[in-house]
Image (tube, helix red, strand yellow):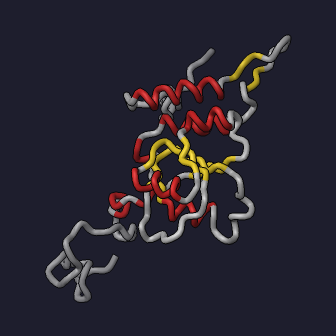
Amino acid sequence: MGIDLDHHHVRSGHRKAPKSENPYTALLVKLYRFLSRKEPFPDSNRYDRRTDSKFNAVVLRRLYMSKINRPPMSLSKIVATAANKYSSKAHEGKTIVLVGTVTDDNRLLELPKLSIAALRYTNTARARIIAAGGEALTLDQLAMRAPTGANTLLLRGPKNAREAVKHFGFGPHSHKKPKVESKGRKFERARGRRRSKGFKV
């Protein structure tokens, strides 16, 4: 067997295990690894997933991710996505799953009754969900209730909503946010940034 010279030193950047040393995360990884593991089919060369569901494999992959790739999601965003006037009928009775943190949003005045399973909750978010008559489940409780991910809705927070992302980019046309105090006359107003500039890109 030959060596692929073009991709000889290229390795997959995807994680095979979490970097976190959190014991709860380690237990969840163990659980979802077990649920998504491929098992040999009886009297056959074929391999089948233990639960015949891709849901567990997706949750497992997200458990491996860094904190930046597991962005939090506010209750208002969850309501806007899964429980608004257009989608509430379609998602009625479903458990909303988030491999990340659920945060509170005090701009949301009324929270409907929701069943949410997440990695963690802020104290106020958990209190509001329970006060509205809903459920704040952990991911291990979800595995007991829905081992195949049936009747669930898997959501993910906005990854590029961080302030740091607004400053990413290079060059004149990237529209990146400058790291300055203000946009006044005395702040970053050299050539190329004022009307009397000597050149144009």
Can residue 157 be seen here? The reply is: yes
Give me the residue at 21% from left, 76% from top: 182
- Tell me which corner region of the image, top left, top right, bottom left or bottom right, holds residue 171: bottom left
The residue furthest top is 43
How many discs appear? 0
Q: Nearer the viewer, residue 145 or 161?
A: 145
Q: Nearer the viewer, residue 22 or 18?
A: 22
The residue furthest left is 186
The residue furthest right is 43
The residue furthest bottom is 196
Please determine whether, in this image, residue 200 is positioned above or below residue 46.
below
Q: Nearer the viewer, residue 64 or 109?
A: 109
Would residue 199 appear left or right of 39 to someone viewing this image? left
Give me the residue at 69% from left, 65% from top: 87
Give me the residue at 39% from left, 30% from top: 22
On the image, the x and y values in percent for residue 24 come to 44, 30
On the image, the x and y values in percent for residue 10 come to 48, 31
Q: Quadrant of the C terminus?
A: bottom left
On the image, the x and y values in percent for residue 113 come to 60, 59
On the image, the x and y values in percent for residue 155 come to 58, 52
Give me the residue at 45% from left, 54% from top: 127
Can residue 60 be seen here? The reply is: no
Would residue 151 appear left or right of 42 to someone viewing this image? left
Please determine whether, in this image, residue 103 is positioned above or below residue 70.
below
Q: Quadrant of the N terminus?
A: top right
